[in-house]
């Protein structure tokens, strides 16, 4: 499957911005947990990890059991512990918040338990007795990995088709390196695949190398978890200049290899979402002297998480709010951006153009959707580029299921994990399982 | 600041806080540092024929991340030469004439008692404490709790001590008996000026689950030790009150057992202790804890209008009664303050699993699910306090008295006078 990653990747300079717990720190924090019943943290988690239970197990020294509780709900619990926006999920709903007491650091505790499970090589799950059925999974990101693992527990043979050379999807190619580096995502994929019986075919693009008809012929059911497509472009003059990149594209390059940024003095990241915030923090961390986020709205209504933006500000990035690029200029490569001010409704204000220096530009205004890939398949409904399914992930075409970003339009890893697992259970029932 | 000076069985001290006879009162240098920190008195670590101790002497139980809520030890009496102890007692007393230095003693024969009492008084002891309490090591040699468990032996040795002593004699009682009263009365009958209680409780503090050996471990073996620390306070309070509410018991008590702060001290005093002794909390936190004890007691006295510690002593004793004298028609129910509730549902789970299934999660039609404030079914609530105990938010759950229209009636009154009882709740 995946080829090894080079050691001198750009992302290697990053260390974790949330430090890992020592055993003692974990115990102290675990003992603070109130062990709520019908706990809000568990309800808030898309995979409904029994948070009070896994924390109690850390407190009693049963860390192996703690990790089991986590993985039983979410097989990607290790990466989710690092990449989940816990501030707006479990930690945000900790009852301590209502008491004015610092909430339990659920993410750090989950990381402690799951890291130890990896370190010790604890394994919890075995493949079920062979069912004689086969499932093809398109894309090797979090949704497919979670789905494949669950399908294997029920004995279904799995083949995962991945167009890239690496598995793990955005967990490998897109997660901010100060949360998790690519090699850790590959560790996780290996660990998940350790259940056995999952055939991963990298470098194979469904719809191109293998037709959908062929895929349908090969398997009794199909899970579609292809994520999102390339970065959206602004459609302004100069966008083709060297030095103007899609954010997701550049982040992938610096996570998987080395991107020389030595000469870069001023970088602009266009957008106000989480990818834009990741982009400014990453460029700043890689030593670019001046990094600015450019967002067409105001700071208060940025779509990115507040806690992420505050952390970016702390890292020293600046921002231009109520501004949007109208052109990029430069001879051969980008040197300047022409921006225009926007009004309260984010509309350009005529005559308010101004120019800023920029020798690197990241476009982080969204990603295209890939649902259209399936548009030719009768029964599959596509809406705003997303694959439409029922609550369990079933599309309108018999035996075809979907989950993750291609279904939800782009959410968290934990959503993909939840949707992948739910779809796997639906596929299992479809294939005649109980 | 009210006057904290204390008078316990004829022993005077600037405040009621004494170090108990234990490692913190092992030497002159320690006791003098304690007095400098503010302690009013010290009961010197038990003198007798110096012994040899083992390596690894203490064990503890931790609970939910809190270290040493209970503690035990297998250390014995002093291991230092008697003449060194007496010299240091003399020096300490000379330097701190107003502080109480009580000398704890444990020897075997009448002659030994006579000799060691004389030497203690010559060294300047303000009082003696007869150690009839240690539940390990010494009792196997016929001393300590072996004496405290036999009222006749207790009385006899006490009478020797009282005869030889010119200073007040306290008898330190062991809790390792089924009823403390005969033992307190034996000390009284022997002429003791007061008793101290409790000594430590016979215990095995824990077991090393990987080595299969109890703690504290000495090589490949362990032995039972004396249990003390915060967790033993309820046992000590009961034994204290058992004596102080008995009309035939009339001598003062120095209270010991799980006292960690001024609140604990006040509780002991309210149940009749005229001084209090502390060991474990000092071992865990140091002499410095006395600053807060002095301040806290002073503030407490000011708040309640007490001007001397005597006014506190025994004030809660009349309220310690028999179950049969409790009013069965007194009724309370739990009320949850919706503004304070954080929605943890701990009261729900405790009531459902551990009590009478009368607190329910809010759901449509019964409470507001959005707030997660549980709903108390007052018609089923027996007023047991469990919800209030588990609630993590101070003053969120209160137990409120219900006027049920029934005149008070105790079980005894019901049985002897046929007084009416309210219908039972939660008994279906």
Image: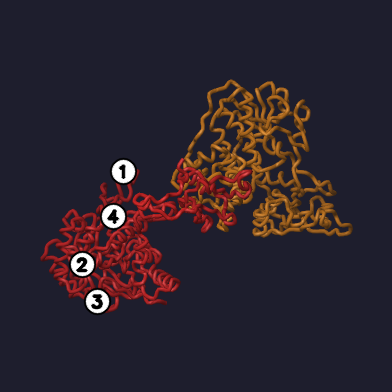
First in sequence: mark 1 vs mark 2: 2
Element at label 1? loop
The residue lying at 19 percent from left, 71 percent from top is B120
Choose mark 1 or mark 2, whichever is in front: 2
Outermost residue toward the front?
B417
Q: Chain of mark 2?
A: B
Q: Which mark is residue B91?
A: 3
Looking at the rendered image, the disc whose residue lies closer to the viewer, 3 or 2, is 2
- In this structure image, what is the colour of chain A? orange
SS at circle 2 = loop
Q: Are marks 4 and 1 in contact (CB under 8 Å)?
A: no
Among the two numbered marks 1 and 3 on one chain, the one whose residue lies closer to the N terminus: 3
**Rounded to the nearest whole Å, what is the CA distance between mark 2 and mark 4?**
23 Å
Q: Tag 3, which secondary structure? A: helix
Report the residue marked by disc 2.
Answer: B192
Q: Position of residue A190 (x, y in %)?
A: 56, 36
The chain displayed red equals: B
Q: Both on one chain, marks 3 and 2? A: yes
Q: Is residue A116 visible?
A: no
């Amino acid at each position: 499957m995946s080829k090894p990653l080079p050691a001198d990747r750009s992302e290697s300079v990053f260390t974790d911005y949330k430090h890992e717990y020592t055993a003692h720190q974990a115990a102290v924090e675990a003992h603070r947990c109130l062990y709520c019943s019908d706990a809000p943290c568990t309800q808030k988690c898309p995979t409904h990890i029994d948070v009070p239970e896994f924390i109690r197990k850390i407190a009693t020294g049963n860390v192996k059991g703690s990790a089991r509780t986590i993985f039983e709900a979410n097989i990607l619990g290790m990466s989710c512990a690092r990449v989940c926006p816990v501030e707006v999920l479990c930690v945000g709903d900790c009852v301590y918040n209502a008491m004015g007491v610092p909430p339990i650091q659920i993410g750090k505790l989950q990381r402690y338990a799951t890291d130890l499970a990896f370190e010790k090589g604890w394994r919890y799950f075995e493949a079920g007795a062979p069912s004689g059925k086969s499932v093809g999974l398109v894309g090797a990101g979090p949704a497919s990995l979670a789905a494949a693992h669950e399908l294997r527990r029920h004995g279904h043979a799995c083949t995962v088709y991945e167009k890239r050379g690496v598995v793990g999807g955005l967990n490998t190619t897109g997660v901010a390196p100060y949360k998790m580096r690519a090699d850790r995502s590959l560790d996780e994929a290996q660990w998940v695949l350790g259940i056995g019986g999952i055939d991963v075919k990298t470098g194979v693009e469904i719809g191109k190398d293998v037709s959908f008809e062929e895929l349908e012929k090969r398997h009794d059911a199909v899970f579609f978890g292809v994520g999102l497509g390339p970065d959206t472009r602004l459609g302004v003059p100069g966008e083709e200049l060297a030095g103007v990149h899609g954010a997701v594209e550049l982040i992938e390059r610096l996570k998987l290899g080395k991107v020389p940024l030595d000469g870069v003095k001023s970088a602009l990241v266009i957008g106000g979402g989480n990818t834009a915030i990741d982009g400014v923090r990453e460029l700043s961390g890689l030593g670019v002297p001046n990094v600015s986020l450019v967002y067409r709205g105001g700071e208060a209504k940025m779509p990115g998480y507040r806690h992420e933006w505050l952390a970016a500000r702390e890292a020293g990035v600046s921002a231009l709010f109520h501004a949007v690029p109208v052109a990029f200029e430069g001879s051969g490569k980008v040197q300047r951006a022409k921006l225009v001010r926007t009004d309260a409704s984010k509309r350009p204000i005529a005559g308010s153009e101004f120019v800023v220096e920029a020798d690197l530009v990241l476009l982080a205004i969204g990603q295209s959707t890939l649902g259209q890939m399936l548009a030719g398949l009768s029964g599959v409904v596509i809406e705003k580029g997303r694959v439409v399914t029922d609550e369990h992930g079933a599309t309108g075409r018999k035996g075809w299921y979907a989950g993750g970003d291609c279904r939800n339009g782009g959410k968290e890893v934990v959503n993909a994990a939840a949707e992948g697992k739910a779809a796997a259970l639906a596929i299992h029932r479809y294939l005649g399982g109980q | 600041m009210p006057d904290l000076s204390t008078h316990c069985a004829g022993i005077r001290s600037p405040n009621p806080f004494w170090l108990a006879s234990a490692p913190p009162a092992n030497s002159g240098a320690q006791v003098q540092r304690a007095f400098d920190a503010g302690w009013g008195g010290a009961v010197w670590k038990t003198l007798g024929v110096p012994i040899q101790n083992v390596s690894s002497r203490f064990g503890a139980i931790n609970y939910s991340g809190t270290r040493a809520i209970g503690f035990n030890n297998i250390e014995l009496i002093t291991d230092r030469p008697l003449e060194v102890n007496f010299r240091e007692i003399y020096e300490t007393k000379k330097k701190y004439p107003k502080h109480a230095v009580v000398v704890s003693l444990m020897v075997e024969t009448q002659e030994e008692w006579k000799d060691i009492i004389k030497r203690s008084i010559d060294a300047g002891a303000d009082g003696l404490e007869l150690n009839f309490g240690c539940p390990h090591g010494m009792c196997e040699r016929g001393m300590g709790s072996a004496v405290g468990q036999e009222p006749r032996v207790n009385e006899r040795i006490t009478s020797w001590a009282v005869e030889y002593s010119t200073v007040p004699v306290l008898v330190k009682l062991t809790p390792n008996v089924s009823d403390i009263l005969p033992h307190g009365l034996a000390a009284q009958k022997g002429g003791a000026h007061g008793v101290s209680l409790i000594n430590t409780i016979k215990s095995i503090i824990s077991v090393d689950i990987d080595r299969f050996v109890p703690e504290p471990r000495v090589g490949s073996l362990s032995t039972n030790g004396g249990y003390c620390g915060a967790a033993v306070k309820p046992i000590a309070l009961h034994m204290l009150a058992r004596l102080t509410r008995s009309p035939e018991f009339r001598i003062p008590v120095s209270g010991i057992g799980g006292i960690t702060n001024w609140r604990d001290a006040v509780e002991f005093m309210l149940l009749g202790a005229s001084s209090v002794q502390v060991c474990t909390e000092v071992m865990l936190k140091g002499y410095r804890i006395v600053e807060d004890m002095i301040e806290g007691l002073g503030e407490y006295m000011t708040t309640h209008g007490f001007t001397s510690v005597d006014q506190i002593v025994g004030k809660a004793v009349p309220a310690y009664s028999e179950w049969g004298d409790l009013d069965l028609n007194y009724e309370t129910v739990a009320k949850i303050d919706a503004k304070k509730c954080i929605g943890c549902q701990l009261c729900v789970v405790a009531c459902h699993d551990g009590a009478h299934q009368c607190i329910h999660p809010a759901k449509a039609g019964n409470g507001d699910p959005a707030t997660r404030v549980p709903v108390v079914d007052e018609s089923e609530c027996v007023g047991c306090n469990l919800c209030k105990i588990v609630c993590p938010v101070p003053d969120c759950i209160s137990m409120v008295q219900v006027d049920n229209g029934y005149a008070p009636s105790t079980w005894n009154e019901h049985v002897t006078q046929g007084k009416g009882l309210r219908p039972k709740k939660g008994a279906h």
